[in-house]
Amino acid sequence: MLRLRLMPAIILSVVLGLAASLALTAAPPQAKSAAAEVDPHKAFGSKSAPVTMEVFSDFQCPACRTLYMTIWRQLLDDYVSTGKVYLIHRDFPLPMHAHSRVAAQYASAAARLGKYEQVERVLFENQDSWAASGDIDGTVAKVLTPAQMVKVRALVKGGALDEAIEKDIALGHFYNVSQTPTTVFFANGQTYPYGGVMSYDILRQFLNQLLNQK
Amino acid sequence: MMQSFPLNLRRSIIWLGRLVLAAIFIYAGYAKIFLPTMHPRPPVALALSFFAMQVDSYQMLPPWGVNFVAHTLPFAEIALGLLLLLGWRLRIWASLATLIMLGFFVVVVRSYALGLSINCGCFANPEPLTIKTVFRDGLLLALSLAMTVLAFLEARSPHPWSEKSYRT
């Protein structure tokens, strides 16, 4: 009776031992290059910050909007402007969103003029309206001058921005990003990929743990 | 003769349930506490705060609830897995395992139905929550339920190797 009851324990010990040895020898996910190939206009904070956060985002994704509206400002104030976190925006327009790639092009074009923050904000704040109408140009025009809009439209039509967006997407695939928002944290040579929205209190707790790591 | 054979279908299912669920619970708890795919391993406190973010992504609990779950669930999973393996008071721990699996299943179905773009967080890896996750949790719930029901039925009849059955 006792022997039969303990049989699963014996078998499982062997199986777990084998699994543990496989896990230890498996190749760990490598941090490709957290700060390499970064558009400086779409990155915030100091490159030498101990923690880097790369946010793979889609302007038409409601969860990305929630992430932006709920934690972005506090994150910039508490961690980015104080040199603790280097925050990078990565475009990851999902095929299921009809206008997200165009929105990413407009935002990237505005970034070249140093107007990324304004355009990012207006796109997220008015997501419902332009997602329904497709009027990204009109939405972006709310925060840029007519002269700036001429330059932005020229950049969007030029097609040169697609290369940068494709690089962001390729980087996302490297990190196995399949959904937005996905945030990849880098600290002390370790990579922590995280999918979804988080509340600021819980994010702060995690960032503090990363910063306190020796 | 058949009655005296120790591994009939009922006992085989109980045995399989104990083995599979114990392995899953122990590995899930271990992975959340130690993040085995990372080299070097991060400190436990960091791993648990990372798991707290994954719990938070389900958007069901306030921050104190998130922290409570994140700091107790991994240890409870390991303990439950070991108790299932030992088979001591099996009906109690099988019932608890079924309740926990039911909780996981409800949470996963809810998140999938709401279209939340999140990671499962089940094994502390970046596995997206998809229909596969729903089916996997459903299967594990079914196995756990079968194990529990059969463990109660089994308790009604003496085991063929028990002293009582030898005497009769």
Image (spheres, helix red, strand yellow):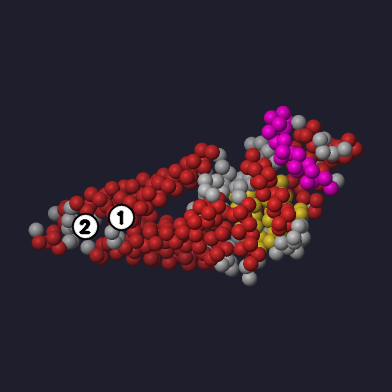
User: Range of the magenta residues?
Assistant: A114-134
- Pointer 2 residue: B6
Expressed as whole percent of the image width and height from the top left, the position of residue B81 reads 38, 59
Q: Nearer the viewer, mark 2 or mark 1?
A: 1
Expressed as whole percent of the image width and height from the top left, the position of residue B38 reads 57, 64
Q: Residue at x 63, y 57 (%)?
A: A204
Expressed as whole percent of the image width and height from the top left, the position of residue A159 reads 81, 40
Q: Residue at x 40, y 51 (%)?
A: B100
Regarding residue A29, the answer to whether it shows in the image is yes
Q: How many marks?
A: 2
As drawn, B164 above or below B152? below
Using a 10 Å C-alpha cutoff, classify the residue at mark 1 as few (fewer than 14 neighbours), some (14 to 19) or many (20 or more).
some
- Pointer 1 residue: B92
| Near-viewer residue (B56 or A176) | B56
Quarter of the image containing the N terminus of chain B?
Answer: bottom left
As drawn, A158 above or below B3? above
Expressed as whole percent of the image width and height from the top left, the position of residue B97 reads 37, 53
Q: Amino acid at mark 1?
A: Ile
Q: Residue furthest bottom?
A: A214
Sooner in the amino-acid sequence: mark 2 or mark 1: 2
Quarter of the image containing the C terminus of chain B?
Answer: bottom left
As drawn, A121 above or below B44? above
Q: Residue furthest top?
A: A133
